Image (tube, rainbow, N blue to C red):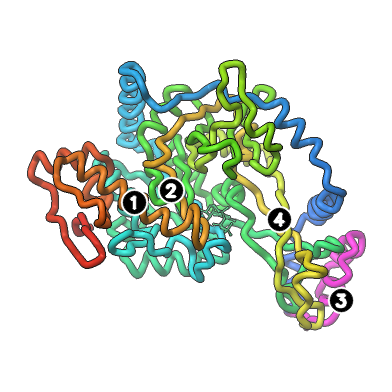
Amino acid sequence: MSSVPAKLLQTLQQHHQHRLLACLQLLPPAQQMALSATLADVDFDLLQATWLSASQPADNHTSVDRAALAQAPSRVVRQPVSATDHQAWALARSIGEQAISAGTVAVITVAGGQGTRLGFEHPKGLFPIGPVTDRTLFQIFAEQVLARRRRHRADLPWCIMTSDATHEETVAFFQQHRYFGLTPDSLHFFRQGSLPALDAATGELLLSAPGQLALSPDGHGGLVTALARAGLLELLQAQGVQHLYYHQVDNPTAIVADPALLGFHIQQQSQATTCVVCKSSPTERMGVLVDLQGRTEIIEYSELTAEQAAGQDSNGQWIFWAGNTAIHVFDRQFLASFCEAGRELPLHIARKNVPCVDETGQPLPTATDGQPNAIKLERFIFDALPAATNTLIVEGDRQREFNPVKNKSGSDSADTCRAALSRIAAEWLHATGLPVDPQTRYELSPLVALDVAELVNHHQQGTLPAITRTTAGCIIATAP
Ligand code: UTP
């Protein structure tokens, strides 16, 4: 094993990585060197500690205690009800719009996930979601970004996080579509890191082929280091960007660079602001934002007993009402300081069936006695929230803003999301006074209107593009 550094061999022995040692023994020198280089970046102590804690008997004392200590978030802006509320929202919106115009805002889309629940064989951003034209998730976001840039005469840089699983196809897709009319130099594709899958029984790293680790994207929490590694935190700083609007690729109704959310974030000098929606029932499977010992944290639905989930405060309000939409605004400096301090978000584990081989390349079973063979590791972006000293929760309009595509069918599926896009377009058309047929599907390009007021204005000014009727429904769009 002349091509393998002695220190690495020692580390592998100390951590009982017998399969890797056997594999290195069998590889030709060039592949030994390549695998050694990959292994040099692996934190074996951390992986072993994570596997050990995952192997402990289930004990949810810690999470039950967290839930018992949690309170409903105190720094909250709720949806507007009174005239005063509406004034506050209008003010926030104008502060947000000024920030976009001043060039202090960038958009971050995380699009590195493998979308296993949806079962689509391409990156999720390529998923056709337009209710009439099948326009893709990426096109809807690109049109939102372009429309915002035009409306606010701003650069509004757009950073798209990909992974080894999605990078090439994503970049090729944008090239093929000529970046949907966006200037390519204002678009930054950057790749997140990956983490090795562990053998659930032994904690050893799994091989996808001889000489190759079984790797998967390191979770949306990989964003923080990926931004720094790509030099984007520095680039955005040099461009004067202070506020990072973060959203996920699977919710096309997210209001990209939402001026109201940005405005409240800026007004209240928040380091991390989260858009939440009221859970539809206490048992809805959604993470919730809470105050925990003076910090903002997320409690996963799986951490709550049914009784806790339904818990109320002294005003009769649910404690665990504030469902996470995964839409955030981060202060750039807050994320930069997090990286500079050398901090890492914690690892979360998921037991999954991962295809893998032994050192000779023979496939190994992906499950034993019905138990998945592997532990996959991920970091979650919301674990950054407790590190912020100043956070804010803003309640969004659930019907308008939160319609994710997660599953093949049922709730949060392509069908529910398409229906939501069509419903929103129909509601806006109705507000213009034009007739709307409840049986017809509607699709509205963000390039025509980013909000209902813009559509009504087009109608009043006579600048509304013609509505095209097809067998699939009605489309209101302009050329990019
Ligand atoms: P999900 O947690 O829903 O995961 O991601 P997913 O990969 O899309 O789908 P499943 O769980 O395999 O079915 C939420 C968002 O975070 C991004 C996804 O692309 C999506 O926008 N994400 C997730 C990443 O960017 N990287 C990751 O490693 C994981």
**Mark 3 residue type:** Ala
Q: What residue is disc 1 on?
A: 421
- Alpha-carbon neighbours of circle 1 within 10 Å: few (<14), some, or many (≥20)? many
User: Per the image, is 9 magenta?
Assistant: yes
**Where does ligand 1 appear, by image quarter?**
bottom right
| Tag 1 and tag 2, C-beta contact below 8 Å | yes
- Tell me the distance, in whole angstroms, between the alpha carbons under discs 4 and 2: 25 Å
Q: Position of residue 457 (x, y in %)?
A: 15, 38
Q: Reading the chain from its start, which is encountered first: label 4 or label 3?
A: 3
Tell me which corner region of the image, top left, top right, bottom left or bottom right, holds residue 321: top right
- Tell me the distance, in whole angstroms, between the alpha carbons under discs 4 and 3: 27 Å
Q: Position of residue 404 (x, y in %)?
A: 46, 51
Q: Nearer the observer, disc 4 or disc 3? A: 4
Q: Secondary structure at mark 3?
A: helix
Q: Reading the chain from its start, which is encountered first: label 3 or label 2?
A: 3
- Tell me the distance, in whole angstroms, between the alpha carbons under discs 3 and 2: 48 Å
Q: What residue is disc 3 on?
A: 22
- In the rendered structure, the answer to whether residue 229 lies left or right of residue 459 reads right
Q: Reading the chain from its start, which is encountered first: label 1 or label 2?
A: 2
Q: What residue is disc 2 on?
A: 403
- Tell me the distance, in whole angstroms, between the alpha carbons under discs 1 and 3: 54 Å
**Mark 4 residue type:** Ala
Of residues 350 and 42, the one nearer the viewer is 350
Q: What residue is disc 4 on?
A: 350
Q: Nearer the observer, disc 4 or disc 1? A: 1
